[in-house]
Amino acid sequence: MADKIISGIAVATGIAIGKAFFVNRNHKAHLPRQTVASDLMPLEITTLHEAFTAVENELSNTREQVPEELKEYGLLIDTHILMLKDPKLRGTAEEYIKSLGLNAAWALEKAVSDQEAAFGAIDDPYIRERMQDVRVVADKVQAKLIGHETDLAAMEGRAIIMAHDLTPADTVELQVDKIMGFATVRGGKTSHTGIMARSLNIPALVGVDKLEDYVNDGDLVVIDGLAGKIVVNPTETELEDYNERAAFFEEYTRKIKRHCQLPAETFDGSRVAVHANIELVEEVASVIDNGGEGIGLYRTEYAYLNRTDLPSEEELTDKYVDLAAIMSPRKVVFRTLDLGADKFISAYGELNETNPALGLRAIRFCLKNPQLFKLQLRAILRASAYGNVSLMFPMISGVREVRQAKAWLAQAKAELRREGVAYDPDMPVGIMIELPAAVMIAEYLAEEVDFFSIGTNDLIQYSIGVDRTNHHVSYLYQPLHPATLRTIKLVVDAAHQAGIEVSLCGEVASDPFCVPILLGMGIDSLSLTPQAIPGIKRIIRQTNMHDCRKLLKDVLECRTVSRINNLVMDNIFKHFPDEVTFFSSLLENEEAPS
Ligand code: PEP
Ligand code: MG
């Protein structure tokens, strides 16, 4: 057996095998706490300032290397440089060296803790968020002071990066071509780290609790981005098995890529549109390369993150026009801001809510901040003049909310008309179905909009009552739960009865076990991460609707997830033998705690 097998949340698929290389260890526990004699204090103070300056210089160098496509992350580095220049933090640390005789690293820790205590008491979310940035820069200075900093030069050849956390700045510093895969303690599926991994297309896990306890520098590790596992120091046999799996995955990826530009049409001629989910406009190349027929979900909030100001209407319009024009005549569905819960913008700060997932997020946040909302609606409308643009509202819970959102859209249209600015007056408007309440009144909601898009990531979270970011209860997060399948079917049927189209844009759309069932329901389109498109198109092209309807009928009669799992496994074995080898690991669900 391997030394250890640890689990995490897979954020990018594939298998990587290589040596572990640690960056950003959590060094706080090892901080030296010593006192210095008064004659050595001047030297300690100089050391402190030199460490600040060295980190500042390093960050400035990194800043210069930030490529154009990551320019939003450059702004975060600027914020960190400003914090290093700020005399307050160094001044307080210097004071602690002088008055208490603390060593530099300890003095700095005390200075940061003081600030955390002072500002933590202030109920201003913006200040709290800035405090997190202060902690990040102080960590870097401390690492320098205690010699814990990462020596990137020591990384020979390519490696698998292990980190407590990876910031966008780290990713730039790390020269991505040298990274075979990575794993972090912190982060969730939609964290920056996760997004980065997906756009870099390297196997990656986040949320790996025990990473720092179980993995050492230089260990041979396997990152299994298919099953969400890290295998530490595998045995010969395990290594052989993983090498085989990795080679198979590579070959499979090459094979499916060859046909990815073909339409997603079943044997018996049913056509399903396969669109892509993107977070950044820069992902467009990958969408087209992987055979995406359009963009079914553009998560617009990412352009608001990682910066201290808000984008202007002109900035957004430029970005949106680019996207609409590049993709034209292909479709682009802009989802209006889905902020709140785990995504905050500095200018509004984190809301102090007991249950943020049930709080002021998405459309609720926008309706409470109409200026911010209207500015975005204007930018989307302006882009609609340049391509095939649709818009959808997230987290709709009732008819009134849709009407309110549409009223702001009407107002934005009226303004543009008065100003003589072009837009598409017939731009389709849809909503995301992510709440059980919306499912139950889908027939009424369908009368208000042009299309539905089912957001299963949230719909599963809210219907099964399981936090999508909490790995303690992830065994309950079941796309193939009978309730999930019935819920989706209710929405598809309601949409079709009302004569509108229905898409599905949650992670379920990239799940090979679920897709035949969705086809059986008659879903009109799927929207998924670009890298998963070739595989899903292949599944669709190798299936026929008759089998899918039969499978749907059978699964709807099942009472348990395990029974449904068996049926879908049988289906995959029968029709898609190539996929079985590695997709089967996806079904090795974690067990419930006993
Ligand atoms: C969803 O909830 O399924 C969805 C696609 O939206 P997000 O993952 O951005 O919440
Ligand atoms: Mg959602």
Image: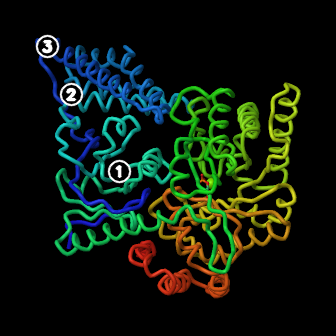
Residue that appears at 45% across and 26% down: 118
Residue 184, label in figure? 1
Q: Are marks 2 and 3 in contact (CB under 8 Å)?
A: no
Q: Quadrant of residue 202?
A: bottom left
Quadrant housing the N terminus = bottom left
Between 439 and 495, the one lying in front of the other is: 495
Between 5 and 278, the one lying in front of the other is: 278
171 relative to 574, above or below: above
Between 67 and 33, the one lying in front of the other is: 67
Which percent across, then down, holds residue 45?
21, 15
Taking the image as shown, residue 172 lies to the left or right of residue 306, namely left
User: In the rendered image, which residue does mark 3 sit on?
Assistant: 38
Question: Which element type, helix, strand or loop, lies under badge 3?
Answer: helix
Question: Which element type, helix, strand or loop, lies under badge 1?
Answer: strand
Q: Distance from label 1 to label 2 (Cα)?
A: 24 Å
Taking the image as shown, residue 439 lies to the left or right of residue 293, namely right
- Tell which tag, 3 or 1, sits nearer the viewer: 1
Counting residues from the start of the chain, the first of labels 1 and 2 encountered is: 2
Q: Are marks 3 and 1 in contact (CB under 8 Å)?
A: no
Counting residues from the start of the chain, the first of labels 2 and 3 encountered is: 3
- Classed neighbour count for the residue bearing mark 2: other residues with Cα under 10 Å, few (<14), some (14–19), many (≥20): many
Q: How is the image coloured?
A: rainbow
- Tell which tag, 2 or 3, sits nearer the viewer: 2
- Ligand 1's quadrant: bottom right
Between 388 and 555, the one lying in front of the other is: 388
Residue that appears at 30% across and 29% down: 109
Counting residues from the start of the chain, the first of labels 3 and 1 encountered is: 3
**Label 2 amino acid?**
Leu
Q: Quadrant of residue 56?
A: top left
Residue 145, label in figure? 2
Which percent across, then down, holds residue 171?
36, 40
- Classed neighbour count for the residue bearing mark 1: other residues with Cα under 10 Å, few (<14), some (14–19), many (≥20): many
